[in-house]
Amino acid sequence: MFARISIAWCLVALSLPFVARAQTETTNAPAETAESATQQNDRMEEVPPEFEGMEVDEHLNNQIPPDLVFFNQNGERVKLGDYFDGKRPVILTLNYYRCPMLCGLTLNGMVDGLKGVDWTMGDQYRILTVSFDPFEQPPLALAKRENYVNYYERPVAEKGWDFLTGSPPGIKKLLDATGFPTRYDDRQKQWIHPACLIVLTPDGHISRYLYGVQFAPQMMRLSLVEASEGKIGT
């Protein structure tokens, strides 16, 4: 069954109060389990009119389509199934690389949390960042990858963190599979979208969603451990 979750949303002109609430709730989350660590983020928030109908529709246990074709940061054609090896969990982030604020806050918060995790990116887990803007191309993805790998400040194994771009049909199928809504705002000239990470099992099933722009290391590690064991959140 799919669960609808109301969370902090992201148009730059309106996002800061919601981002601040997401930061506070994530920071104060208990650490006993990944389930309890995310309960603070499941509270209802008032949503401005611009964000109506933009809730994430959680597709827990849904399989990410392995045959969807994208291009990695080197311009190489890849399938999403290439990243699901049956051994390592995957953190999927849906962003766009020209995002003026929220995508950077989310990725920065993720990396900050992972710096406190004793697992090594590429060895015990992978990260897959996919742009939902069909006009973005591999050179921009490569520049973003270099920035964030440098920010991580630890070695990243091959396919430890890839940044992908794709075509409208493939992007739509991935967004549909994850329940992740996007909408382009012509007035602001930017995308409206949620702030969340999607943790996948080693075979590509959705284990849980993590909301906000700050992610405590203990929550990140517990989510990865549970996903690596094939556990699906409620």
Image: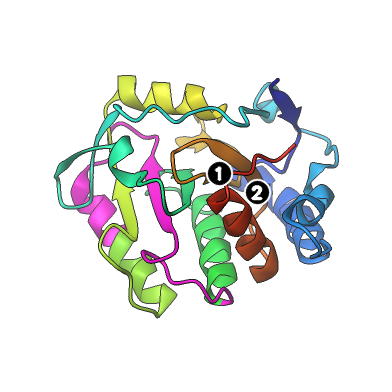
Look at the numbered discs 1 and 2 and tell me whether their residues touch, using CB distance below 8 Å. Answer: yes
Q: 226 above or below 198? A: below
Q: Which residue is mark 1?
A: 198
Residue shown at the point (16%, 52%) measured from the top left: 74
Q: Quadrant of the C terminus?
A: top right
Q: Is residue 10 left or right of residue 184?
A: right
- Spot occupied by residue 54 in the image (x, y as percentages of width and height): 64, 27
Residue sitting nearer the eye, 93 or 30 = 30
| Mark carried by residue 210 | 2
The magenta segment: 116-144
The image quadrant of residue 56 is: top right
Say which quadrant the N terminus sits in. Answer: top right
Tag 1: amino acid: Ile
Closest to the observer: 87 or 22?
87
Q: Position of residue 6 (x, y in %)?
A: 76, 34
In the image, is 104 to the left or to the right of 26? Answer: left
Q: Name the residue: 28% across, 42% down.
A: 82
Q: Position of residue 12 (x, y in %)?
A: 59, 47
Q: Amino acid at mark 2?
A: Leu
Secondary-structure class at tag 2: strand
Q: Is residue 144 visible?
A: yes
- The one nearer the camera, 79 or 57, is 79
